[in-house]
């Protein structure tokens, strides 16, 4: 049975992000021997701790994904960060088991450097742009081109983040149809935020008229203006096991869960598009 969006959001609200633990192990009796007997099977690596680096673009759904995976007995530790910074952390010796990247170039360079298993890199999902507007839409935003109207206050992502790189591609399309659009929006921009969630939070509180974010980061009760395909751009998310990861079996299980199991259902319910054909 397909998961409902309500169930996904409930999971997101209830599960801690930093360490989404499975069932607590029962301590062994004091008299139990310290070593495993020959007839006792070892614990499955896939059912032990799995550490996953995920991008800010997936922060809103990381908790629900980890909780669903942990039902099988795993203990998933999710670390959310900016993809370029996580790439640097891998180069400096960080050893998560799985990396989900929001920048194909960073994943490619990591594969070339041997930081992830190159022949197991695959596209996980895609997301696209939407305009989130303040409650009641006081600026009367009817389309992305209205972000250029005089007096509109706009929030955009910082220039180093994937959200801006995707936004910039979308703006290039709008500029071709409406010359001067980019300069006008730049003049209307009151802040560059270090992440999508700060944009969503501030706009939904009425601190700005509008912001450009990923559709998968907007809560169900927020007011949005869709961006037509002609002006939209997509962010592909990729996934791979980390070469130096401590739990390769757990990494394989988590990746299978994300690409073909219940994780895929959660992503679809959250609005993610499937990998490009």
Image: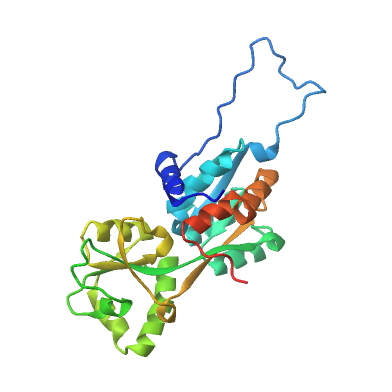
Image side of residue 56 versus residue 147, left or right:
right
Let me know if residue 189 appears in the view: yes
Image side of residue 174 versus residue 204, left or right:
right
Number of marks in the rendered image: 0
Image: 208 above or below 11: below
* Horizontal and vertical percent position of residue 34: 71, 18
Q: Which residue lies furthest to the right in this view?
A: 38
Q: Which of 256 and 269 is in front in this view?
A: 269
* Horizontal and vertical percent position of residue 8: 46, 48
| Residue beneath the point at 63% across and 57% down | 240
| Residue beneath the point at 41% across and 64% down | 215
Q: Residue furthest top?
A: 31
| Residue beneath the point at 30% across and 76% down | 143
Image: 54 above or below 166: above
Image side of residue 22 versus residue 251, left or right:
left
**The C terminus: image quadrant:** bottom right
Image: 30 above or below 14: above
Q: Quadrant of residue 201?
A: bottom left
Q: In which quarter of the image is residue 216?
A: bottom left
Q: Which of 151 and 258 is in front in this view?
A: 258
Let me know if residue 160 appears in the view: no
- Please, which colouring scheme is shown? rainbow
Q: Which of 195 and 207 is in front in this view?
A: 207
Image side of residue 160 versus residue 190, left or right:
right
* Horizontal and vertical percent position of residue 182: 32, 82
Q: In which quarter of the image is residue 196?
A: bottom left
* Horizontal and vertical percent position of residue 46: 67, 40
Image: 201 above or below 225: above
């Amino acid at each position: 049975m397909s998961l409902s969006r309500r169930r996904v959001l409930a999971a997101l609200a209830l599960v801690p992000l930093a360490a989404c633990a499975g069932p607590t192990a029962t301590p062994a009796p004091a008299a139990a021997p310290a070593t495993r007997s020959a007839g006792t099977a070892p614990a499955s690596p896939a059912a032990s701790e799995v550490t996953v680096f995920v991008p800010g673009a997936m922060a809103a759904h990381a908790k629900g994904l980890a909780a669903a995976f942990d039902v099988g007995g795993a203990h998933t530790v999710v670390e959310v960060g900016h993809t370029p910074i996580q790439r640097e952390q891998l180069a400096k010796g960080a050893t998560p088991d799985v990396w989900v990247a929001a920048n194909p170039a960073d994943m490619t360079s990591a594969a070339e450097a041997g930081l992830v298993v190159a022949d197991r890199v695959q596209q996980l999902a895609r997301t696209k742009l939407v305009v989130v507007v303040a409650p009641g839409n006081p600026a009367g935003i009817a389309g992305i081109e209205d972000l250029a109207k005089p007096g509109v206050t706009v929030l955009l992502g910082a220039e180093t983040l994937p959200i801006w790189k995707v936004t910039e591609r979308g703006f290039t399309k709008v500029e071709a149809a409406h010359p001067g659009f980019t300069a006008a929006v730049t003049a209307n921009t009151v802040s560059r935020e270090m992440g999508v969630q700060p944009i969503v939070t501030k706009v939904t509180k009425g601190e700005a008229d509008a912001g450009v974010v990923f559709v998968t980061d907007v809560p169900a009760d927020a007011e949005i203006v869709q961006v037509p395909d002609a002006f939209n751009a997509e962010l592909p998310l990729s996934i791979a096991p980390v070469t130096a990861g401590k739990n390769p079996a757990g990494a394989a299980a988590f990746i299978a869960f994300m690409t073909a199991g219940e994780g895929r259902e959660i992503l679809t319910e959250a609005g993610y598009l499937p990998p490009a054909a």
